Image: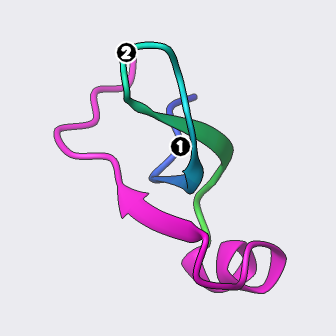
Amino acid sequence: MIPEYIVFNITMKDSSGYLLPVGQGNDPKELHERFSGENYVIKPVDDREEW
């Protein structure tokens, strides 16, 4: 199952400079409670396709 939202920590980057994901889920309120603060960004997953 593909999540609707992914959480990124803007202070954690890989060797290419991309942000690393730290969480995922389908409820943005729950994700905001778990990952609150300026270091986290919650982004929706666009063009989801279930297999």
- Measured as percent of width and height from the top left, residue 9 is found at 60, 54
- Measured as percent of width and height from the top left, residue 32 is found at 66, 82
Residue 11 belongs to magenta span: no
**SS under mark 2:** loop
**Residue that label 2 marks:** 16
Near-viewer residue (14 or 4): 14
How far apart marks 2 and 1 lie (CA) works out to 24 Å
Picture quarter with the C terminus: top left
Picture quarter with the N terminus: top right
Near-viewer residue (43 or 3): 43
On screen, residue 23 versus residue 46, left or right, reads right
| Residue at the extreme left | 47
Instruction: Please tell me which residue is depicted at 74% across the width and 79% down the height of the picture.
Output: 30
**SS under mark 1:** loop
Residue 47 belongs to magenta span: yes
- Figure quadrant of residue 35: bottom right
Question: Is 36 drawn above or below residue 20 in the view shown?
Answer: below
Give the number of the mark in front: 2 or 1. Answer: 2
Question: Is 17 drawn above or below residue 38 in the view shown?
Answer: above
Instruction: Please tell me which residue is depicted at 56% across the width and 76% down the height of the picture.
Output: 28
**Residue that label 1 marks:** 3
Q: What's drawn in magenta, residue-wise?
A: 28-51
Instruction: Please tell me which residue is depicted at 68% across the width and 85% down the height of the picture.
Output: 37
Q: Amino acid at mark 2?
A: Ser
Instruction: Please tell me which residue is depicted at 61% across the width and 70% down the height of the picture.
Output: 39
